[in-house]
Amino acid sequence: MKLVLTLLALLALAGCGGKAALNPDPPISTFVAPSANSEAATPEAIAVASQEVKGKTEMNNSLFVSPSGDDKNDGSSKDSAFKTLERARDAARDLKSAFKGDITVYLSGGEYQLSNMLTFTPKDSGARDARITYKAVSGETPVISGGFKVSGWEKAELDGNEVYVARIPEGSGIKHIRQFYANGIAQPRSSTAELAWTWKGVNDKSGIKTPLRDLSSIKDISSVEVFWPVEWKVFFLKAASSNRREIAFQEPYYQDFLDMMEDRFSVGEVPMFYPNTKFGLYLQNDLSFVNEKGEWFYDEKSRELHYYPADGVDMKSSEFYVPVLEQLMSVEGGTKYNTVGFLTFEGIEFRHGAWNEPSESGLIINQAQNQMVMTRDSGKIVVNYENIPSNITVKNAESLVFKDCVFSGMGATALSFESNVKYSTVQGCVFKELSEGGVSVSNSGADKDSFEQKCIGNKIDNNVFRRIGLDYWSAIPITVYYASETQITHNDIYGVPYSGISLGWGWYFAKDSTVASKNLIADNKIGGYLQKLRDGGGIYTLGQQPDSEIRGNYIFEEHAAYGGIYLDEGSAYFKVSGNVIDIDPSLSKDSLNWLNIHGLKGGPNGGMTTYDLEVFGNYHNIKNELNSGEPATVSVHDNFFVESGKFPAEAEKIIGNAGLQEEYKHLLSNVK
């Protein structure tokens, strides 16, 4: 009878879009169902169920999970689904030892609330001819969440405005809240407008002054963060005290910050790239700053969350979440040959990841997804450069696929292929409502050709990126450090605070690195970039990358300097051709450029540090370009200036081909 039920379940899946039931050798799959009411399975019950799963492999190669399941079930059908993802993962381990073929773990719709990070190790690997897939049931949306649902709102009044207050319970595991979501949309943290400022004195950097802002209305200065966006960097420092127009900062972090700046200046870095009065600042995170619709503030002492509802948010019917878990999922092998691989994650939404480090010790983002971390050695400041953490991390892995997934409401980088990730793919996914960046590949320390670090042959294709870098403005939708054979193709990127795509690292300092090569950025649609910061581009590169290409991209709506395509320090061995750069000078007070090739003296043979580049066959509608590359080896030729502003048919063909391919255009219905 159980065999009949299993076959019926497979046929039912086929009827709702699955084809596995019609396959004479169907893949193994596991279905997990979330259930708030089922009892926790005992280890003894799980052991018995595990043996039952092994015994069914000849008749059923699918496993099932659902929020309404039970870990004491055998997972062999939707009606006997497991409850937790961990239980389904462990059952898949058992199945692969008894069944030689593909395994599919079906996830039913609903929310899988994580209390701990979901991990996949080499024990969870598939094989080249036996892939393991974690896949949404057709027509359903499973959500893997690290968030906490906020309820119990009570109406209150704040400075004449109607706000709502909810108390976060002690047992929620929440200490800090840096993000808050209403109906899936990130709401802005309470903040002032941009403020002018000075140091406390001409030679006194012990604090700052805000000459045009009276600070006496601040209710709790110890909660306030000072946010400095400077060129392409961002700085967050925690306040300690204030009077009417002066702020002092929390120690020891502030002294570390001052010493860090002096250290950087001593090695030749430019002071204007660190907090200076040319750039304003913002004060964030106090109840007195809640004066615009959508703003919120969390009082860590009273555990009260205050919210001034945005237009269209019904406090009775809307859903409200704050992130709790900092790492939702890890896919991580050991080193060298002990990798994890041949796994697919398909049709899953990953939602609500936290990142609380800035609330503890402040934050300095050097560039892209790279932060400056300060330590001390015998009293002397030491500055280390590290990747910003990610909510979903992949290390020592091969042949992974993230397909048709959604990454939303993340406080850190959403997805990172951090080190030794090879021939893996992110395709047909949506990245939205992110405080930091979207996808990063490799890391800033991977400049040596080591097996343990090198990322090779990864593909980021036909994805959508919207509302990226909401809190940390230097974030980039797609960042690649030292990597080879990377393909970044047919992505749709719009409305970002800094650059659209960043490829390469090391400037000219890593001139001996052989890691980065044969990379491709092609057929992407990138618009509305540099909306908050400057000194970036639609496509931005660093470092030498032999046999690399940038072609067929449509780049439009540049909001600040320096270029639609920006080949910065150390960039070498690129061909740049067949791109369309469509710039509206009215969007910025800066002098905008379609192309910026930036090099300094000190390159090969005494030449410039940007060299061996060929830029040809591109279409652009403004003449402005900057070129300080090596004249002997940088060739900019046969590009087409479109004086009328109307691009010719050849350019229109490039524009039409850029961005999502036809089978992925439905993804745009998932974003605003």
Image: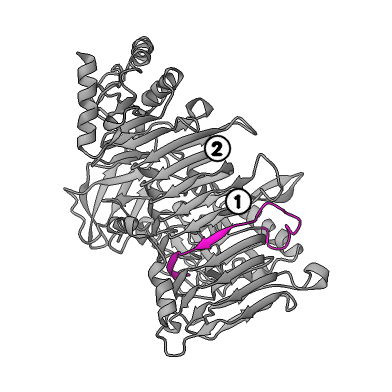
Question: Which comes before the other along the chain, label 1 or label 2?
Answer: 1
Crowding at label 1, few (<14), some or many (≥20) Cα neighbours within 10 Å?
some
Residue in view at x 40 percent, y 67 percent: 657
Extreme residue toward the right, this view = 605
Q: Is residue 334 above or below residue 451?
A: above
Q: Nearer the viewer, residue 433 or 218?
A: 433
For the C terminus, the image quarter is bottom left
State which region is magenta: 506-531
Residue in view at x 36 percent, y 31 percent: 104
- Is 539 situated left or right of 42 in this image? right
Examine the structure image and report whether residue 528 is included in the region drawn in magenta. yes
Q: Nearer the viewer, residue 471 or 141?
A: 141
Q: Which residue lies under the disc numbered 1?
A: 253
Q: Which residue lies under the disc numbered 2?
A: 397
Q: Is residue 379 above or below residue 523?
A: above
Question: Which x, y percent locates residue 400?
Answer: 48, 40
Q: What kind of secondary structure does the magenta stretch mostly adopt?
A: loop
Question: Which x, y percent locates residue 263?
Answer: 73, 59
Helix, strand or loop at label 2? It is strand
Examine the structure image and report whether residue 394 is included in the region drawn in magenta. no
Question: Which x, y percent locates residue 594?
Answer: 53, 78
- The answer to whether residue 237 shows anywhere in this view is no
- The answer to whether residue 443 shows anywhere in this view is yes
The amino acid at mark 1 is Tyr
